[in-house]
Structure formats: structure tokens, C-alpha cells
Image (cartoon, helix red, strand yellow):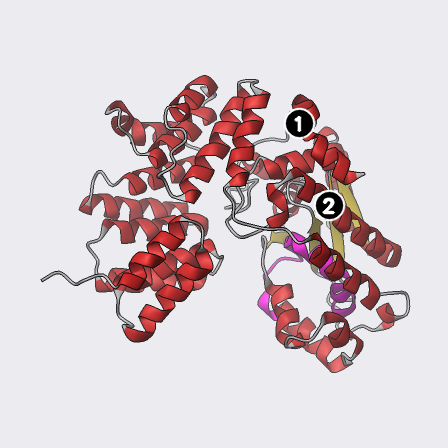
């Protein structure tokens, strides 16, 4: 007799499909408390953890599920999705192939494998993977969406839009499937020059995100940081003299991945990506105290301990090591005190360009709650900008500002400026950063696999008055 599915897992599936990730997680963990070897509970919780950025736990869970029930194609497909998220694309292709061995026509697996070919910059292989399913005329929405992405990558923009328009509004599909579809449709429409239709698609995709941005909470958090650090309190610092760390900070879509890639291409440079090490350490040592209270009472021994733990966790053989967690802009005061030898690169870009780029990009669920509405984007940008001006007033000699527009128009000049700030000699490889073959896991993965281009610089101009809510909020 087949094992009966725990009704809590059925509810968890519904919650996950509707974007209620936290509820799905609590249900899965409750089942595993009662039945710790339930492979479906492990697989569902793995999916939740992957969406929430808990990648190590997600991989452990899905591998345990496969060990318990190794003939389920969806389990192998989920493992492959996670490996793709981690940048291990070749292993992901192998996992997809194993899944297709058990279920050759599994829509999610076919779409996932094609999407991984796109991550490897091989759109023709993605199209070949999905063409048989598309010819049947009743393709799955996920397959149609990835197929459209491949068409966009091969500059068949009208075809991509046509494929997706036939599936609208797809009301019965899971929330994240619909969100992805709308953002891909928006990109296709934008490439076709249909800017109002593109904006409408981006708007629809953002409207499906279940997030609320609290501007007052954001202001309070930023004000607390400003109050904790002034010309008197910054005299407090650890005795650690390590000067190998560079922190890249700023807004999303500001050219930060490009900047990191330039440094990483240097023989003596290494980029760590968007790691959570520093904010996690602050959370660990503050033990739930309000940040201002924690910092006012911090002892030099604690500063030394945090510094050493951070350095140990991020050590490589490189001379210069880059931490590109953009949200660290909030903690520049703390970082500067804990690592007195560290420097900061502040990536900047026209705020209208940043705002549109964030609005037109599908971000992971339950993250960046400010990015779903133009007004919220503008309000958040103002708070970030004010805090950065405060840090510049305190640490101007340790912060290099890199303007995206200058970087793409004057690549060599700005590359030399960046390397000089990092105390690295100029190297030709930094001018050919896209040849490094490094796995890039950020939203800018496509851009850093090709030479510098300036076509996106004034993208916002095409949208005219549609961006007025952003303009007003930025004032």
C-alpha cells in the first residue's frame, strides 16, 4: 500500500506555491519532528531552504531525500536546481540527466536543464532541449518561459513575446512561476521597443510579490547607525592590522558585480561574492541587543575576536579579497572599526537607472521588500544615499566611489583607478574580466560574461512618464 501523504505537507505545498515560504517551512519542520525520515518533507523543506538562501541545509536535505527514495525525478531535478543556484552548472546538468532517466518528459526538469544551459551561455542547447515540447502545442508554462528566455538570448524578441502572450494570465500557476513569466515577457517587450507593454508586464510581476516595505523601520535602522558612529566613537577600533579586505557596497544593479569581476580577474585578487559573514557575526556577538547599545558597550577584546573570526572565515591565497555583500553599506562604521585596514568601494549609478533595473528584475521571494514599487524604491534609495554621505564624512580616505557610467565609458582609466585603490598593479586580464570563467551567482551573471557595453546606461529614458512615481520619491 502506498504511503499516505501527511496533510501538513499538502498544506505546505499550497503555501509554497502561493509564496508563503515561512508557513511552508514551519509545516515541513513539524512533520520532520514526528517523522524524521519522511523524504517528501525533506524535499519540500529543501526547496524552502533553497528559496531562503540556506543553501547548505537545502543540499543536505535533498540528498537525504534522494538517499531514501532515489527514483523520484523531481528530487534529482531539485538537486540540480540547487547546484545551478550554487554555480556548479556541470554537476547540475548531470543531476538533470539522472532525473530525465526516471521521467523523460518531466516539465520542471526539462525547463531546469534548459535554464542551466542558459546560465552556461549556450542558448542554442536550451532551445534544442525544449523544442520537442514546444512543438506539441500544449507546453507547460515553465517550459514556455525558459524557451522565451532562450529566444531572447538569440535575439528573437518577437517570437519570445508571442510564446508567452498565449499563456496569459496563467492564474492557476504557482505565484513564482507567474512572476518569472511576467518578468521575461517584460524583457521581451522591452527588446521589441514596446515600452508601455514592458512596463505593464514588470508591474504585474511585482504585484504578485507578497511583501510590504516599512519606510519608518528603514529610517529608524539607518538613524541608529548614524547615531552609533560619529567623530568620537570611530576612535574605537581593534588591534588587527590586516589590510587585505575590500568591501564593495551600494545599491543593487549599480555595477558592483562588474567591479568585483575586474578585481577577481587580477592574479592577486579574489572575489567572494555576496557573503553574509559580517552581518552574521554582528548578529552573533550582539545577541539580540539594540545595535546602538551593543556598540556603545563593546570592548576591544570583542572587536579583536570579531575581526579574527571574519578573517578566518574569508581567507584565501589572494593578496586582495573582496566581500561584495552590498547590504554591508549599513555597517561601514562597524567594519571600519573592527578591520581598521579594510577599504570600501562604493558603486554608484544614476538612481533612475538603478530604480528601473530593480523594478524590472525578478528578485528572490521575500527579499528586498522595497523593490516592488517605484515609490518604495525611491524612498529606500534616499535613505541609503543619506547613510552613505554620513560614512563619507567619516571615512572619505577609505572609500572609493566608482560611477557605473564612468566605468563603462572609460574602462581602462577606471580599472586602473580601482586597482590602484586596492594596491594592485595594473594587469591586462582585468580588461578582459569576462574570460575568467568564474561562476557568478548574482543578477548580473549575463553582463559579466561579455565585454563592457554601455547600451543600458540610459535605459530609463524609454519609459518616460511611467517612472514619475520614482522621480517624485527621489526628490
Q: Quick check: can you spot residue 18?
A: yes
The residue sitting at 88% across, 55% down in the picture is 393
Q: Quick check: can you spot residue 425?
A: no
Residue 160 x %, y %: 43, 23
Is 246 or 160 nearer to us in this picture? Answer: 160
Q: Is residue 137 above or below residue 204?
A: above
Position of residue 298 in the picture relative to residue 270 (left or right): right
Q: Where, by quadrant of the figure, is residue 353 drawn?
A: top right
Which type of secondary structure does the marked residue at label 2 adopt?
Answer: helix
Q: In the rendered structure, which segment of residues is drawn in magenta?
A: 312-339
Position of residue 87 in the picture relative to residue 278 (left or right): left
Is 114 or 196 nearer to us in this picture? Answer: 196
Residue beneath label 1, please? 466
Q: Residue 379 shows which numbered tag?
A: 2
Q: Where, by quadrant of the figure, is residue 408 drawn?
A: top right
Q: Dot 2: within a 10 Å radius of its alpha carbon, few (fewer than 14), some, or many (20 or more) residues?
A: many
Q: Residue 59 shows which numbered tag?
A: none
Q: Dot 1: within a 10 Å radius of its alpha carbon, few (fewer than 14), some, or many (20 or more) residues?
A: some
Q: Quadrant of the C terminus?
A: top right
Amino acid at each position: 500500500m502506498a504511503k499516505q501523504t501527511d496533510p501538513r505537507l499538502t498544506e505546505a505545498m499550497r503555501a509554497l506555491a502561493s509564496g508563503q515560504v515561512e508557513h511552508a517551512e514551519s509545516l515541513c519542520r513539524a512533520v520532520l519532528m514526528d517523522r524524521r525520515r519522511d523524504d517528501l518533507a525533506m524535499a519540500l523543506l529543501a526547496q524552502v531552504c533553497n528559496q531562503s538562501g540556506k543553501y547548505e541545509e537545502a543540499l543536505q536535505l535533498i540528498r537525504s531525500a534522494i538517499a531514501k527514495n532515489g527514483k523520484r525525478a523531481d528530487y534529482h531535478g531539485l538537486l540540480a536546481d540547487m547546484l545551478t543556484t550554487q554555480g556548479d552548472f556541470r554537476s547540475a546538468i548531470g543531476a538533470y540527466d539522472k532525473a530525465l532517466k526516471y521521467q523523460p518528459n518531466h516539465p520542471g526538469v526539462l525547463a531546469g536543464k534548459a535554464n542551466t544551459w542558459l546560465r552556461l551561455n549556450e542558448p542554442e542547447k536550451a532551445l534544442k532541449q525544449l523544442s520537442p515540447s514546444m512543438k506539441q502545442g500544449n507546453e507547460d508554462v515553465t517550459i514556455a518561459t525558459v524557451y522565451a528566455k532562450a529566444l531572447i538570448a538569440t535575439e528573437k524578441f518577437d517570437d519570445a513575446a508571442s510564446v508567452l502572450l498565449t499563456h496569459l494570465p496563467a492564474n492557476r500557476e504557482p505565484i513564482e512561476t507567474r512572476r518569472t513569466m511576467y518578468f521575461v515577457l517584460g524583457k521581451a517587450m522591452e527588446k521589441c521597443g514596446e515600452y508601455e507593454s514592458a512596463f505593464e508586464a514588470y508591474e504585474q510581476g511585482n504585484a504578485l510579490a507578497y511583501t510590504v516595505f516599512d519606510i519608518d523601520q528603514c529610517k529608524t535602522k539607518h538613524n541608529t547607525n548614524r547615531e552609533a558612529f560619529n567623530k568620537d566613537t570611530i576612535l574605537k577600533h581593534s588591534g588587527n592590522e590586516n589590510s587585505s579586505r575590500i568591501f564593495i557596497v551600494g545599491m543593487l544593479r549599480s555595477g558592483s558585480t562588474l567591479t568585483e569581476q575586474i578585481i577577481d580577474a587580477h592574479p592577486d585578487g579574489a572575489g567572494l561574492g555576496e557573503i553574509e559573514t559580517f552581518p552574521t557575526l554582528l548578529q552573533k556577538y550582539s545577541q539580540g541587543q539594540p545595535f546602538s547599545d551593543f556598540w556603545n558597550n563593546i570592548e576591544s577584546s570583542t572587536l579583536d575576536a570579531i575581526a579574527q573570526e571574519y578573517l578566518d572565515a574569508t581567507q584565501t591565497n589572494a593578496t586582495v579579497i573582496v566581500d561584495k555583500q552590498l547590504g554591508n553599506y549599513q555597517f561601514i562604521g562597524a567594519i571600519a572599526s573592527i578591520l581598521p585596514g579594510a577599504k570600501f568601494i562604493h558603486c554608484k549609478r544614476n538612481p533612475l537607472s538603478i530604480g528601473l533595473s530593480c523594478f524590472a528584475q525578478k528578485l528572490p521571494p521575500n527579499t528586498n521588500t522595497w523593490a516592488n514599487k517605484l515609490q518604495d524604491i525611491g524612498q529606500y534609495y534616499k535613505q541609503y544615499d543619506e547613510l552613505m554621505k554620513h560614512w563619507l564624512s567619516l571615512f572619505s580616505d577609505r572609500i572609493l566611489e566608482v560611477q557605473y557610467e564612468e566605468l563603462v565609458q572609460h574602462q581602462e582609466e577606471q580599472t586602473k583607478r580601482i586597482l590602484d585603490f586596492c594596491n594592485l598593479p595594473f594587469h591586462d586580464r582585468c580588461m578582459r574580466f569576462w574570460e575568467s570563467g568564474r561562476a557568478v551567482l548574482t543578477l548580473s551573471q549575463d553582463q559579466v560574461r561579455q565585454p563592457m557595453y554601455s547600451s543600458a546606461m540610459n535605459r530609463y529614458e524609454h519609459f518616460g512618464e511611467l517612472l514619475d512615481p520614482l522621480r517624485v520619491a527621489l526628490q
